[in-house]
C-alpha cells in the first residue's frame, strides 16, 4: 500500500475518524455521569477510572504500534494461525494481569490517604481493578485487531488511524467495564 505522506492526505484520513471519536467520547462522559453516585460513595473507584481507561488505552496502543510496524514490514498476517499475532495478543493480556493488581493496590492506598479510610477492602479494589483490566485487555486486543484490519482493507495507514480509535474506544469501554464489574462485585 503506497502511503501519501502529505498534510492533506493525513488530514483527509484523520478528520472523519476524529469527528466520530469525538461523539464516542461524549458517550463515555454520559456513561460516567450515570455512574457518579457510586464513584462518590467509593473513592477507590473514582481513582480507578482515569487509570483504568488510560492503561487500557496504553495496552491497546502498544499492540497497535506493534501491528503497524508488522504491517509496514510486510509481516502482518490476519490469519488465526499467525503466531506473531497470537503472541502479541497474549503479551497484552499478560501485561494487564501484572499491571492492574498493582493499580488496584495503588487506588486503595491513595483513597485511604485522601479520604482517611478506604470504603472498600483492599481485596475488593484489587479484584475490581484486575477483573476490569483483564476484561479491557481482551477487548483492547479485539478493537486493535479490528481497527488495524479495517485500516488495511480501506487502504489507510494504520499509523494514522488505529491508535486514536483504540484509545478512544478503550475510554468508553473502560467506563462501561469498570461500572459493570463494580456492579457485579460490590
Image (spheres, grey):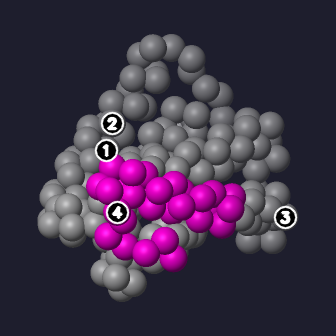
Give residue 72's quadrant in the image: top right
Disc 4 from disc 1: Cα separation: 38 Å
Residue 124 in picture, x, y percent from top left: 45, 77
Is disc 4 in contact with disc 1, using a CB cutoff of under 8 Å?
no
**Mark number for residue 121?**
none
| Relative side of 151 to 53, left or right | right
Residue 76 in picture, x, y percent from top left: 76, 50
Mark 3 falls on what kind of element?
A: helix
Point out the tag, 3 or 2, that comes first from the N-terminus. Answer: 2
Q: Residue at x 28, y 66 (%)?
A: 42
Disc 4 from disc 3: Cα separation: 47 Å
Is disc 4 in contact with disc 3, using a CB cutoff of under 8 Å?
no
User: Label 1, on which residue?
Assistant: 21
Mark 2 falls on what kind of element?
A: helix
User: Label 2, on which residue?
Assistant: 18
Point out the tag, 1 or 3, that comes first from the N-terminus. Answer: 1
Disc 4 from disc 2: Cα separation: 41 Å
Q: Residue 118 colored magenta?
A: yes
User: Label 3, on which residue?
Assistant: 83
Point out the tag, 4 or 1, that comes first from the N-terminus. Answer: 1
Q: From the viewer's perspective, is the residue at label 4 or at label 1 nearer? A: 4
Q: Say few, some or many: other residues with alpha carbon within 10 Å of mark 2 (under 14 / 14 to 19 / 20 or more).
A: some
Is disc 4 in contact with disc 2, using a CB cutoff of under 8 Å?
no
Residue 18, compared with residue 90, is above or below; it is above
Q: Residue 76 colored magenta?
A: no
Is disc 2 in contact with disc 1, using a CB cutoff of under 8 Å?
yes
Q: Residue at x 33, y 30 (%)?
A: 15
Q: Say few, some or many: other residues with alpha carbon within 10 Å of mark 3 (under 14 / 14 to 19 / 20 or more).
A: few
Residue 21 in picture, x, y percent from top left: 31, 44
Quadrant of image for the C terminus: bottom left
| Relative side of 94 to 121, left or right | right
Amino acid at each position: 500500500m503506497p502511503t501519501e505522506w502529505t498534510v492533506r492526505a493525513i488530514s483527509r484520513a484523520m478528520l472523519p475518524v476524529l469527528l466520530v471519536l469525538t461523539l464516542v467520547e461524549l458517550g463515555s462522559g454520559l456513561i460516567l455521569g450515570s455512574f457518579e453516585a457510586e464513584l462518590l460513595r467509593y473513592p477507590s473507584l473514582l481513582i480507578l477510572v482515569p487509570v483504568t481507561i488510560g492503561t487500557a488505552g496504553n495496552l491497546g496502543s502498544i499492540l497497535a504500534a506493534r501491528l503497524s510496524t508488522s504491517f509496514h514490514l510486510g509481516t502482518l498476517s490476519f490469519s488465526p494461525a499467525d503466531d506473531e499475532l497470537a503472541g502479541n495478543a497474549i503479551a497484552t493480556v499478560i501485561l494487564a494481569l501484572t499491571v492492574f493488581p498493582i493499580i488496584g493496590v495503588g487506588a486503595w492506598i491513595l483513597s485511604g490517604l485522601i479520604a482517611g479510610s478506604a470504603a472498600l477492602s483492599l481485596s475488593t479494589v484489587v479484584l475490581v481493578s484486575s477483573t476490569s483490566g483483564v476484561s479491557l485487555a481482551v477487548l483492547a486486543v479485539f478493537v486493535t485487531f479490528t481497527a488495524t484490519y479495517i485500516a488495511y482493507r480501506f487502504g489507510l495507514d494504520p499509523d494514522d488511524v488505529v491508535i486514536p480509535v483504540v484509545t478512544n474506544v478503550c475510554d468508553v469501554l473502560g467506563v462501561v467495564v469498570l461500572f459493570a464489574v463494580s456492579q457485579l462485585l460490590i
